[in-house]
Amino acid sequence: MEEKFVFDSKKRWVLGSGMILGLLCMLITFFKDDELHTRFWTNYLHNTVFFVGIALMSLFILAAFTTAFAGWSTLIKRVWEAYALFLVPGLVLLLVLIIGVWGHWHHLYHWADAEAVKTDKVMFGKSGFLNKYWYTFGTIIVVGAWIYFAQRIRKYSVEEDANGPGEDFSYHRKIRTLSVIFLPIAGFSSAAMVWQWVMSLDAHWYSTLFAWYSGSSWFLAAIALTILLIIYLKAQGYMPKVTANHLHDLGKYLFGISVFWTYLWFSQYMLIWYANVGEETIYFRERLDNYKPLFFLNLLFNFVAPFFVLMRNDTKRKVGTMVFASIVVFVGHWLDFFLMVKPGARLTALEAMAHHAGEVHDAASHGSGLPFAMGFSFPGLLELGTMFGFLCLFLYMAFTQLAKASLVPKNDPYLEESLHHHVV
Amino acid sequence: MSVVVSPIREPLIEGGKTYHQITEDICSPTEKAPNFAWVLAFTLSSIFLGLFLFTVAWTIWFGIGTWNLNRTIGWGWDITNFVWWIGIGHAGTLISAILLLFRQRWRTGVNRAAEAMTIFAVMCAGQFPLIHMGRLWLAFFIFPYPNTRGPLWVNFNSPLLWDVFAISTYFTVSVLFWYTGLVPDLATLRDRSKGIRRKLYNIFSFGWTGAAKHWQRFESLSLVLAGLSTPLVLSVHTIVSFDFATSVIPGWHTTIFPPYFVAGAIFSGFAMVQTLMLITRKVLKLEEYITLQHIDSMNKVILVTGTIVGVAYLTELFIAWYSGYLYEQYAFYNRVLGPYWWSYVGMMACNVLSPQVFWSRKIRRSITWTFAMSIFVNIGMWFERFVIIATTLARDYLPSSWSYYVPTWVEIGIFLGTLGLFFTLFLIFTRVAPVVAVAEVKSILKAAGDQYTGPNAAKHHHHHTAVAAQTGAH
Amino acid sequence: MKQEKEVLYGLYDDEEILLGAVKAAKAEHLEIMDVFTPFPVHGLDEALELEESRLHIAGFIYGAIGTLTAFLFMTWVFTRDWPIIFGGKPYWSVPAFIPITFELTVLFSAIGMTVSFFTVCGMAPGRTNPTLDDRITDDKFCIAFDAAGAGEDMLNRLRSFFSQTGASEVHLKTI
């Protein structure tokens, strides 16, 4: 059952070139940018958070499936293990942001501007949480904890390969214990981190649902990327035992969680629209006024397309439709994060630059009618290039991990179930 | 067998059952005279049902003034009970639909009873908005029908009207799902009985024959109904949460309410399923079908949903502080430390802290612990709704209107009365239909029977061959 | 009423034996009238080469009718028939229409599918469809052949088929 993935030089070369292309795009962005390099930094934050989230959700999927006695997914669990280990480079990427906060390299967060906080009552009230200490140590401790779980689960999984299932499936039981402990920790900590990383970009705004909403967005991106990788590996001749039945179940997740994402999107939007409290509606007002195409593309990519494409059973079993749906959903959630990141950071930067220029200015007066700006109002080629670079980095790391162990976890107690998986 | 089952899985049907024994074990309680425990329970619940009828009649005769609602506290026990019952009603559909989609085999032991419980719980829930209308005979005004008043339509923008649609749809679809699943089992009862019983079951089993094509359509229908019920069950408690969250009242207007209400509903629903199933398996001697493995799994769901609810409580508290919005901050300060602090403590203790004992496998598999915890959780979830409703309304914007709400005997009587209604209906159900889905349990026998899987599988096989050899020798 | 039919049927004790028998019947080109089982047997649809049920397509159509009914009706009421402003929202408040639209979609689809299911299966409250054996809803798996007009040769061939494939009982019955 042993199956070795070879990360050959051609793959390395392709992914390496992709990374260089991404780097090039980032450099161009940096030098073409405004004085605060807002476009560069928002792109960096956007992609870092997006791919760290995919790694986190891969670990979450692994833990949740283990806890729920899922048997069908055993054949593909190595993909999630490999994805989850991207948390390690992910933490390095996050450290750059952290150092940036301390060294004032970027002006992403309004709350990081000590002078603004002094005069701003709302931000002053939040400064117990929105400060560089929480941002730094929160990130390091929380992501560090995730890495701990990712590495331990991986360790036992690989040892199980080498040493057999163990007395009364001891390896699997260890993995299960780790998974169970990880789940509530992930529940609390991912919320805290996404408030820090993303929600605080709109420093005045708040929504209790935000963490769950962005979490479901990450989850879908992770599932979509899983499907794409599996189809790629199968096309390369790997994973011969993964059949249309496994694809079908992944398709169900892509479909079902897309509906769930829509549900969360609607709940958040509708409640804020209905109650019409100014402090809250500003978030959607801003997006509807200045980012209208993205606002609707978000729904088109993440709800309409997967819903109608994946509703039928047979489309979840076909490679073509699954590739299409996965790419749409992956890009869709990348856009979703784009829309979470850019508007708030852009206003912060505009205000800061106006302040530098000596104008009396506040973010609210921009209100409607921000001019079209490539990279903010809509992602340009540089954004796509940057995303491609990050994607190549992510895959490079994942391939490195995939090559380190057999693609088939040959001693997993559920392996037989997965080999005989058949969707009714 | 074509089903491949991991050796790590625990069996879900014990006692080395054959198909016939399954039929016999599950159907026979409906064919015998009820035992003393049933009669006692039925008498008791009928008395409570009587109390329900009496207190409702009292309310309608003398008016809503018999309740302690006042100007600021327009919603008290009534809506608390309504939300509580609706929440309990969620487990049935969850077990039937979501666990079917997730292919969790353990659902077959408990789904039928849980679905029945859903229907009865929704019936109990539905009483409260109706009674609260005061003039019950005008209840049909809530439906949009062509009328002579203008025509004046109902307000389609109101979450209260969304509720009307959500709950009536939920009730209808739950009944359809439950009854369609019941038809083949009623046919089993029909084919086992004679005389008048056979005639009655013949009417209710719709002429089921068990033909292959019918089973195929049956499975297709179940799957689509499950697929429809899954978002439906989410939507129902979501819309209940909209009743609160669309307002601008601090403590009510928060975006996390929809998923948090749903998680809470699943949480309390599973607790009620535990309460019922622990009694049912004992009284009807179904311990080999509703095994410790089932109880363990359900306790895990309780632990997970209890923790999710805990995350939501803390999120609310944290974001209230984070919002920097004075009234929001006060609303939560008031919840935790205001005059109703005891209900907040009750909620936290029962919903978040106490379920944490289920981290221990030993406790998850202890009948006593599980039973006690299931009652605890239901108390805790009642407190949660009370906390949200009463404490918020008792301290609104205008301090001169602040008051303290205590229910009257009528309100308490109606609540206790719905418990009577619920248990009366459930007890009748256990007498007339199989409480465990017979056909579905048979369909998982070879994948989850203890003679086929788990630690005893080998022993049983041996035993069977020995018996076969003996009969062969004769 | 239905005409009377002569049926030769065999009872099996296990679904795996039944599945083998169905496959054998297909191989021998015996025309199975129907198969009756106490629970849905995995793999039987394929063995019998049953067409996939189209019930879910009907369900989609019913659901779409529900969607349109709800949405268009609310639109008509609040923009044409009796427009009222609620809470400063526009007459045509799409987000507020979503919940009821969703509920009616589900309601129409569920009721429509269930009614269709019972109708196409020839089932209704109080309906009595002929059954071959009371134990089919308990623990027997049944294959039935149409025996009307079958000659002695054919009957013998069927009987030997049953005994070869492991049927525990064989009966001839008029229903």
Image: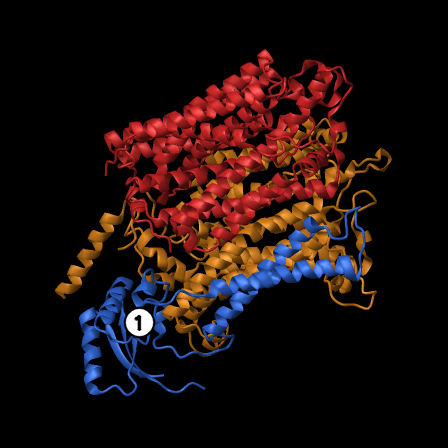
Chain colours: A red, B orange, C blue
Q: Nearer the viewer, residue B45 or A86?
A: A86
Q: Nearer the viewer, residue B44 or B312?
A: B312
| Residue B50 visible in image | no
Residue extending furthest toward the left:
B473
In percent of width and height, residue A53 lies at 49, 31
Image quarter (top left, top right, bottom left or bottom right) of the N terminus of chain A: top left
Taking the spot 22% from the left edge, 87% from the top edge, the residue there is: C151
| Residue A332 visible in image | yes
Left or right of residue B324: residue B4: left
Taking the spot 56% from the left edge, 19% from the top edge, the residue there is: A31
Tell me the residue that label 1 is attached to: C142
Does B128 appear above or below A26? below
Residue type beneath disc 1: Cys
Which element type, helix, strand or loop, lies under badge 1? strand
Left or right of residue A65: residue B163: right
Q: Which quadrant of the structure image shows residue C72?
A: bottom right
Q: Which quadrant of the structure image shows residue B321?
A: top right
In percent of width and height, residue B227 lies at 50, 55
Q: Give the chain letter at badge 1.
A: C
Residue extending furthest toward the right:
B400
In percent of width and height, residue B374 lies at 53, 44
Q: Nearer the viewer, residue A74 or B11?
A: A74
* Mark 1 crowd level (few <14, some 14–19, many ≥20, 10 Å Cα): many
Left or right of residue B461: residue B286: right
Q: Nearer the viewer, residue B290 or A59?
A: A59
In percent of width and height, residue B307 lies at 54, 35
